[in-house]
């Protein structure tokens, strides 16, 4: 049972660190950043899941996804055989 707690703690710590790094990189306002960090530190699993579910996408990320999907649609139609 101790091994389970150790692995769970390691996963929670890694998840919290990755989430906090993303919060800091996104340059939210001071109060919003502090609130998310406090939430993630107090509740590592719940706070991290809530942050990743509720965070808005960056405009550059949305544009990259759109361009990638457009490229896939274009390349998919070129490879088809047409009688």
Image: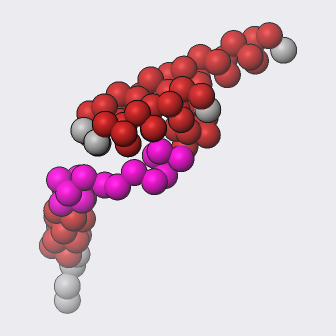
Q: Is residue 15 visible?
A: no
Which residue range is magenta in the image?
A: 50-64
Residue 27 placed where, x, y %? 24, 38
Specify the quadrant that holds the N terminus. Answer: top right
| Residue at (40, 29) in percent of width and height | 20
Residue 78 placed where, x, y %? 15, 73
Most foreground residue, 8 or 71 = 8
Residue 47 magenta: no
As drawn, 79 above or below 13? below
Q: How many marks?
A: 0
In the figure, is residue 72 to the left or right of 32?
left
Which quadrant of the structure image shows residue 44? top right
In the figure, is residue 25 to the left or right of 47?
left
Residue 62 magenta: yes
| Residue at (45, 31) in percent of width and height | 37
Specify the quadrant that holds the C terminus. Answer: bottom left
| Residue at (20, 57) in percent of width and height | 59
Residue that protrudes farthest toward the right in the picture: 1
Q: Is residue 4 visible?
A: yes
């Amino acid at each position: 049972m101790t091994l389970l707690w150790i692995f769970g703690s390691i996963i929670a710590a890694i998840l919290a660190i990755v989430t906090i790094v993303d919060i800091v990189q996104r340059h939210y306002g001071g109060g919003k950043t502090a609130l998310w960090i406090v939430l993630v530190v107090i509740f590592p699993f719940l706070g991290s899941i809530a942050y990743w579910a509720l965070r808005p996408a960056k405009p550059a990320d949305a544009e990259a996804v759109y361009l990638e999907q457009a490229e896939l649609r274009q390349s998919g139609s070129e490879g088809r055989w047409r009688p």
